[in-house]
Image (spheres, rainbow, N blue to C red):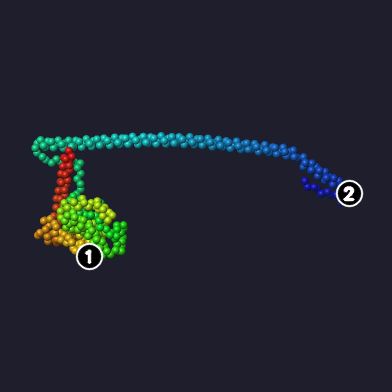
Amino acid sequence: MATQETVFPQKLSHKKYRAALKKEKRKKRRQNMARLRDLAAPPEEEEENDSTDEQLKERLLELERQKLHEEWLLREEKAQEEFRIKKKKEEAARKQREEQERQIKLEWEEQQKKQREEEEQKLQEKREREEAVQKMLDQAENDGTWQNPEPPKELRLEKYRASCPFYSKTGACRFGNRCSRKHDFPTSSPTLLVKSMFTTFGMEQCRRDDYDSDASLEYSEEETYQQFLDFYHDVLPEFKNVGKVIQFKVSCNLEPHLRGNVYVQYQSEEECQAALSLFNGRWYAGRQLQCEFCPVTRWKIAICGLFEMQKCPKGKHCNFLHVFRNPNNEFREANRDIYLSPAWTGSSGKNSDRKERKDHHEEYYGKPRTSHSSSHHSSKRNRESERKSTHRVLAHQACTTLTLLYHHK
């Protein structure tokens, strides 16, 4: 509390002034003592206030703990409810999965049963057909007359495919088994084909990368030909030990289906068969030999004519044979197809050469060397002959199928 300043009268005697001043001092002293008493008395009340505050704090903490406990109970109850819902969903999903598995198993069993029934039905139909054929054969034997039975209705004849001209002329096709035309693999032939028997460094580089045209530039033609001569003198005596060799050709093409192929033509098919059984599967220069019969017997249509004149536009990537020249022109007579059947020798030599040149011209230029007046008649004859050959092939296949059915029984 702020002290009020004492106001004295303006006109007081010295004695009165001194008495008033003392009185004022006593008053201030009493006030100070009273203030001190007031300050000394409160400790008990403060203790009471402190105890009350502590009780309030404890009460508040208790309420806070109770509130937190209630919240925890709510969370626990909510978690328990979510757990129960999750368990119900898992149980429902498990039941649904078991039901689906049961349905799949039933469908599979039904499908298996249906397949067994279909197989039994097919077997029954097959037995009925065989019984009908056997009955017809027995009836024909009893009657003493024979007639070819009607072909089965379910018989599917293979679609006629023309023969591949490149395989029939060179014994190899760039498409292999993917060729859309038919490859007539011979069961016996006087010519033996050994695939990729001859190899050089340049050929090996081309084998790694068929599209790299500069792979063999490091080796000259003279070095490659010298390697061929070494190969020639090393291999040819082995083939001659089997029989008389009338032609020996080594391909220098870079195409994968012709690269390094070796052609050996014997005088007879028996000698070629003996060579096949002797050389097939043997090892030479670190690789196993793959031998097969080759349909090539006429070399004028197998070897590229433009290669001999060094004018082939495709180079060593041609699909006709580019071959190494044999030393001392050995087997030169075979190049002119002297070793042919009688139908292609004698007076018909010029006609055969002319026909070969004509076929070669057609192969390269895509158009025949015929006069305009005879083109219509020749195309008509070709269509008729093709239709007749197709009918003959279909009839032969039908007869073969029926014969197989008869022998099967």
Q: Position of residue 317 (x, y in %)?
A: 26, 60
Residue bearing mark 1: 310
Element type where label 1 sits in the image? loop
Q: Residue at x 29, y 62 (%)?
A: 216
Q: Position of residue 294 (x, y in %)?
A: 20, 53
Residue 244 in view here: yes
Instruction: Please say if 23 is above or below 244.
Output: above
Residue 315 in view here: no
Instruction: Please say if 320 is above or below 116.
Output: below
Q: Viewer-proximal residue, 220 or 271?
A: 271
Label count reads: 2
Amino acid at circle 1 = Gln
Report which quarter residue 307 is drawn in: bottom left
Q: Position of residue 28 (x, y in %)?
A: 82, 46
Distance (Cα) linking label 2 and label 1 = 156 Å
Labels 2 & 1 near each other (Cβ < 8 A): no
Q: Residue at x 18, y 37 (%)?
A: 129
Mark 1 Cα within 10 Å, few/some/many (few <14, many 20+)? Answer: few
Instruction: Please say if 360 is above or below 109.
Output: below
Q: Nearer the viewer, mark 2 or mark 1?
A: 1
Task: Residue 241: give its label.
Answer: none
Left or right of 258: which side holds 39? right
Q: Residue at x 20, y 37 (%)?
A: 126
Name which of mark 2 and mark 1 comes first in the sequence.
Answer: 2
Q: Viewer-proximal residue, 323 or 40?
A: 323
Q: Quadrant of the C terminus?
A: top left
Residue bearing mark 2: 18
